[in-house]
Image (spheres, rainbow, N blue to C red):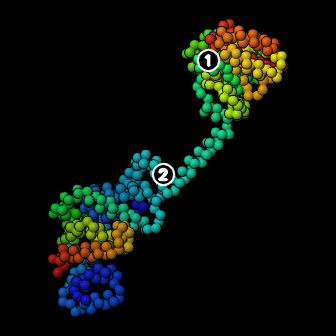
Amino acid sequence: MLAYQHRVYSVALRMLGDRGEAEEVAQEVFLRVHRSIRDFRGEAKLSTWLYAITSRLCLNQLERGSRQRRVGEAALARIADAHANPGARLEASELERALHRAIAELDDERRMVVVLRDLHGLAYEEIAAALELPLNTVRSRLHRARMELKRRLRPFLS
Amino acid sequence: MNCPEARELFSSRVDALLTPEQRRALDLHLQTCAECPREWERFRRTVSLLHSLEEARAPAGFAARVIEAARREPWLRRLLRNVFLPLHVKLPLEAAAIVLVSTLVIFLYRQTPEVQRAVEAPPSPRVAAPAAEPPAKSVTLEQRQRDLGAPSVPGVTAPPPASPPKAAESERVGALEAPREKDRPGKEEAAPAAEPPAVGGRMDAAREARKSAAPAVEPKPAARAQGPFHLVGQLKAKNLEALDSQLTDLVKQVGGILVRDAEPMGGGSIVEVIVSREAYPRLEAGLRQIGDFTVETRASSFPQQVRVALRIAE
């Protein structure tokens, strides 16, 4: 089970932007899985189930309103820094920083789809199952998110 | 295909989800459009950058902290989870178990007279109050015979109960020696615990007899007053066949209560009569008319309610 710890933590950190909160959410994910592992009927992949719990907890956390403080520039920079290794932080390219920032500036629902698809490689169907969304909605959100990222990164890509 | 239509297909193209026709149409547009190829290149690089991002790693000790937190789960939540989850499995099983146990309890209750007696037996005082007694009642209770068969009552040869409590024995002895002391209310409250157990089979017969007999057979709780006998006597009836009715009439005349077995009175039977102290002389006189009455054991003085045990001889 804990083989998934890095994946769960990574999603939580990308969504919440705070190491402490990400660890709390990741811990809660595994506690919930521990409590209800007997309910898992194996119809979906275990990883999909874990991503479903993780995404639900993250979105709930974001909806509580305390996340508004993260809109500021300083907060966005912290999110970018949070994903860089401390040793490599100074070497992180401006493009990578811009990418982290652009991801952080996506709205929560779009960010979640991009994180699951492009950072964790889930199939469209897995994302639809984890987020309990229609497949077309997943496809549409992902495309909008990628287009928005492209627009934000345009100065670095030309 | 125009530019917006082409750009809508960028994501599907990156993920290789286009149909061959869509792919051909998009490629054709990219070859002929001036702006879309650049947009497509930016789009492709953006997604490529996203794919290149490294996964963050959970902090050191995270797994250990999760395991520790799982161990600290509140006991109540653990208990509820273990008892009820998964609901779709455990709830029907638990309901079936409740039904099964209930059925078993009812079955055992019906099949075990001792349990029925324990449930039905009312807490009764040692001596009934005169106002609460009916003029004459006939009660079936083998217990009376067992009481009389206790070793503390000399001259009575009825078999002793299987395991009579010692407290019951000492109370019977004490009653014959000092009945006044036993009549105190404070002493009487402890009496029910000293009652020896009755025998189930006979109680069933008695219960059936009470159900089918006239209401006069059913005693009020007061008539079930239990405790030591103040007088034990032997009655050798002149006419055994008429004894039942004669004794019933006599007890009725003296305003007493007759406690007897469900079976017809005969040699070896033991019955109990409860009369007031004032009415006892009339009872004794009547008994001497019915047959040869001999007093075997007698308390030095009688309380207000006198309990008389009669051993019927052939």
In the picture, measured across the screen, residue B17 lies left or right of residue B269, that is: left
In the picture, measured across the screen, residue A40 lies left or right of residue A17, that is: right
> Considering the numbered disc 1 on the image, is that residue within a helix, a strand or a loop?
loop
Q: Is A19 drawn above or below residue B249 in the view shown?
A: below
> Which callout, 1 or 2, points at the residue further toward the start of the chain?
2
Q: Which residue is mark 1?
A: B127
> Considering the numbered disc 2 on the image, is that residue within a helix, a strand or a loop?
helix
Chain containing the residue with disc 1: B
Q: Residues within 10 Å of mark 2 (few under 14, many from 20)?
A: few
Q: Which residue is mark 2?
A: B84
The quadrant holding residue B115 is top right
Query: Looking at the picture, do discs 1 and 2 lie on one chain?
Result: yes
In front: label 1 or label 2: 1
Total labels drawn = 2
| Towards the viewer: A93 or B203 | B203
Circle number at residue B236:
none
> Which residue sits at x=33%, y=75%?
A136
User: Which amino acid, mark 1?
Assistant: Val
